[in-house]
């Protein structure tokens, strides 16, 4: 048996030795290509496909993370805008009197005119105009006095802790006294309208 194997190997070497140099080079490189092909097909390709799958999975996860970061930034921005809006709303709400405070506010407006040295000709609250969460309370006012007194009166109205706006301001010189002017305008204040379905409104009912 050993002799047969030895003879076979000897024949193989004899056959190789009979080949030309070019043929032996081709066989050598062919063998390398076959070994490389086997390595690539059975070992490298499965790992390569696995690596590509992991890369795609990583890219998908990274894209989700980036989208989540963008949403988080937008959410944070919206949260800050909402907080700022809430702050502005609370400031405005503090300047809107409730219904029970309206008589006091009207008294303050009247006292501001008297302390400015003006005489009231007309002080007539008009029908309220309902808006969204508030109502406008227009007051038709007509006073007589000097220019300086009118300026002081308007300044006092602007300094009240409740919102009072001036509309349709008209100045006319008194025909009987050149030092006196007749000032007519509409002072508009505002009141908060409580939502109908709040617990407090239900208690009042």
Image (tube, helix red, strand yellow):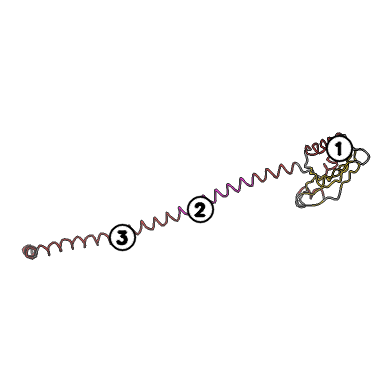
Residue 69 has which mark?
A: none
Picture coordinates of residue 57 (x, y %)? 42, 56
Distance (Cα) linking label 2 and label 1: 61 Å
Where, by quadrant of the figure, is residue 145 drawn?
top right
Decide which of tag 2 and tag 1 comes sooner along the chain. 2
Left/right placement of residue 8 relative to residue 161 reads left
At horizontal 77% and vertical 52% (from top left) the residue drawn is 131
Residue at the spot of label 1: 113
At horizontal 88% and vertical 41% (from top left) the residue drawn is 173
From which residue to which does the magenta span run? 61-83
Left/right placement of residue 113 relative to residue 33 reads right
Disc 3, SS = helix
Label 2 crowd (10 A; few <14 / some 14-19 / many >=20): few
Residue at the spot of label 2: 67
Q: Which corner quadrant holds the N terminus? A: bottom left
Residue at the spot of label 3: 45
């Amino acid at each position: 048996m050993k002799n047969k194997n030895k003879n076979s190997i000897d024949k193989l070497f004899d056959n190789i030795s009979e080949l030309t140099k070019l043929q032996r080079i081709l066989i050598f490189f062919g063998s390398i290509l076959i070994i490389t092909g086997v390595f690539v097909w059975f070992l490298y390709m499965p790992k390569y496909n696995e690596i590509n799958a992991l890369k795609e999975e990583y890219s998908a996860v990274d894209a989700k993370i980036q989208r989540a970061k963008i949403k988080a930034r937008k959410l944070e921005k919206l949260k800050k805008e909402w907080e700022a809006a809430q702050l502005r709303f609370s400031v405005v709400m503090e300047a809107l009197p409730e219904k029970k405070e309206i008589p006091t506010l009207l008294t303050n407006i009247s006292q501001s005119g008297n302390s400015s040295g003006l005489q009231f000709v007309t002080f007539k609250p008009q029908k309220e105009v309902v808006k969204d969460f508030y109502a406008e309370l227009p007051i038709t006012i007509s006073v007589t006095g000097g220019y300086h007194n009118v300026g002081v009166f308007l300044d006092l109205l602007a300094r009240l802790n409740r919102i009072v706006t001036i509309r349709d301001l008209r100045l006319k010189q008194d025909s009987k006294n050149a030092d006196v002017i007749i000032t007519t305008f509409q002072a508009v204040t505002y009141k908060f309208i409580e939502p109908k379905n709040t617990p407090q409104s239900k208690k009042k009912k």
